[in-house]
Image: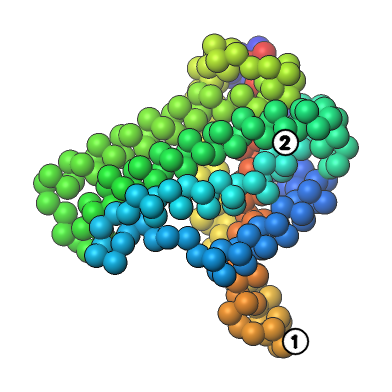
Amino acid sequence: MNGHAQPFKTWIIQDGMALMWQGRGIVAISVLLTVLISGLGSVVPGPSLLDTEGTPSLIGAIGQVIWFAIYAIPLIPVAYISHIAVLRGEVGFAAMLSNGLAGVLYFARGMMAAVVVAAVLGALYQLVFVSDLLLMSAGRVDASAALRLGVGAMVALLAFALFVLLGAWGAMIVQAGQARFGDVLAVGRRCFFYLLVRLLAVVLFLPILSALVLPVMGQVVAILVAVGIPADPAFMIVSAAFSALIGCFAVVLVSVIFCRAWQLAK
């Protein structure tokens, strides 16, 4: 079957919403863990990316990578059950147990490795280009800074293209129990434009979704304040919970996209 076939009867967003509901137990645990991690981050804040003199800090970049990886931990089970649900039809805790603990840990190790690589690349990008980004935000970009930012944009696009090419790794692990680099790359190449268009749509959709939930967040914060919770903790809890929900939804959508690409390519 080629990458232009369309055998699916539902929209990706429909599948995403259905999987969020079917895996609501895992999603709820993920949201709770994210809220707890956010609370820990407010009590023990990590080092800033910029030091007191406004220059990039290596210690701050390392701390950013660590916190990025910690925040990704609750999302990995959501990605796992989403892959299982799309490829095998098992949902929720049954999906978590379908391959046993070994299957979960194998999937989690690979996903965490990908998260760490993405976090390191993001931190390096900021360390290299943070001064130019600050100049751009102040409207003071000269020709050399514009050239460096252009190079940075190309590097970011290449990293995104690499993610598109290799993202089917999870689907292949779930179905075949192993994933050779060449096989994963073949799926990415065969369905590259299928993946690219849909992943870009997800990237563009998430800010819209975030804006849509802002009024709801405000109402929930107001309710918590009305029942006696101080405003700052209430805002932290609600913003962390809604951010976690949006993150879970994004993970589910991306999982559906890559699983469908694998089904198209096999």
Instruction: Locate residue 135 relative to residue 48 in the image: left or right.
Output: left
Label 1 to label 2: alpha-carbon separation: 37 Å
Circle 1 residues within 10 Å: few <14, some 14–19, many ≥20: few
Q: Which image quadrant is residue 168 in?
A: top right
Residue 177 position within the rendered picture, expressed as x and y whole percent measured from the top left: 73, 18
Q: Are marks 1 and 2 in contact (CB under 8 Å)?
A: no
Instruction: Locate residue 69 relative to residue 162 in the image: left or right.
Output: right
Q: Is residue 156 above or below residue 240?
A: above
Please tell me which residue is depicted at 35% across the width and 42% down the height of the picture: 124
Label 2: which residue?
80
Q: Residue furthest left?
A: 143
Q: Nearer the viewer, residue 264 or 58?
A: 58
Q: Nearer the viewer, residue 2 or 234?
A: 234
Q: Is residue 258 visible?
A: no
Which of the marked residues, 1 or 2, is nearer the chain's N terminus?
2
Give, as a three-letter code, the residue at label 1. Val
Residue 159 position within the rendered picture, expressed as x and y whole percent measured from the top left: 41, 32
Circle 2 residues within 10 Å: few <14, some 14–19, many ≥20: many
Please tell me which residue is depicted at 25% across the width and 37% down the height of the picture: 151
Label 1: which residue?
227
